[in-house]
Amino acid sequence: MQCPYCHSDNTNVLESRITAEGGAMRRRRECVKCGKRFTTYERAEGVDIKVVKKSGKIEDFDREKLRRGIMKATWKRPVTMEQIEEMVDEVERILRRKTTTEVRSWEIGNLVINRLKKIDPLAYLLFASVYREFESLNDFSDELAKLKEGVV
């Protein structure tokens, strides 16, 4: 494993443990060269999930793309990287349990939105504004009203 700080290939594993949901191995590592510590996750390669976009185009499921989208919505919000990682893990786990290997992009969006709403309502609104393609302030105020009423 390469150190993300100095790019040395010489790292030691300090601690290994299975994540709470059992889908990955979490490893704390230390770089022998620079002494900095970092965490890696090891996951088994499984069935390839295909995402059907609104346009009909089909792409491979990309955990990193999902993580980046969630991180944009939670930027400067009280949401930890651990919560984001758990959310990505949970969404992927649900998708892998499906009987089909193809999933519509709106299904993934709904899974994320439902989880963000419980963690941070503002992050939920930010994610929803992109996911549901808000075009005006009225879209925001309508969604905010639903959120306040507990309808969403």
Image (cartoon, rainbow, N blue to C red):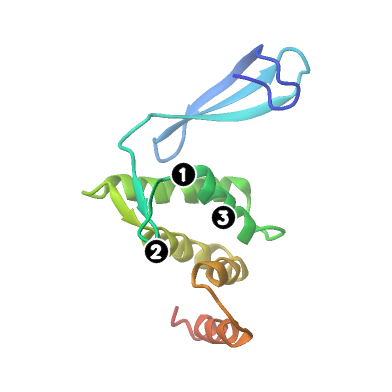
Q: Is residue 127 left or right of residue 114?
A: right
Q: Secondary structure at mark 1?
A: loop
Q: Nearer the viewer, residue 6 or 135?
A: 135
Query: What is the x, y in percent for residue 146?
Result: 50, 84
Residue type at mark 1?
Asp
Q: Residue at x 44, y 65 (%)?
A: 114
Quadrant for the C terminus in the image: bottom left
Closer to the chain start, of discs 1 and 3, is: 1
The answer to whether 28 is drawn above or below residue 151 in the figure is: above
Residue type at mark 2?
Lys
In three-dimensional space, the C-alpha distance between marks 1 and 3, rounded to whole angstroms, equals 11 Å
- Marks 2/3 in contact by CB < 8 Å: the verdict is no
Query: What is the x, y in percent for residue 72?
Result: 63, 57
Closer to the chain start, of discs 2 and 3, is: 2
Label 1 belongs to which residue?
62
Quadrant for the N terminus in the image: top right
Picture quadrant of residue 28: top right
Label 2 belongs to which residue?
54
Q: Secondary structure at mark 2?
A: loop
Closer mark to the observer between disc 2 and disc 3: 2
Q: Residue at x 37, y 30 (%)?
A: 45
The answer to whether 100 is drawn above or below residue 123 in the figure is: above
Mark 2 residue crowding within 10 angstroms, few (<14) / some (14–19) / many (20+): few
Mark 1 residue crowding within 10 angstroms, few (<14) / some (14–19) / many (20+): few
Closer to the chain start, of discs 2 and 1, is: 2
In three-dimensional space, the C-alpha distance between marks 2 and 1, rounded to whole angstroms, equals 16 Å
Residue type at mark 3?
Gly
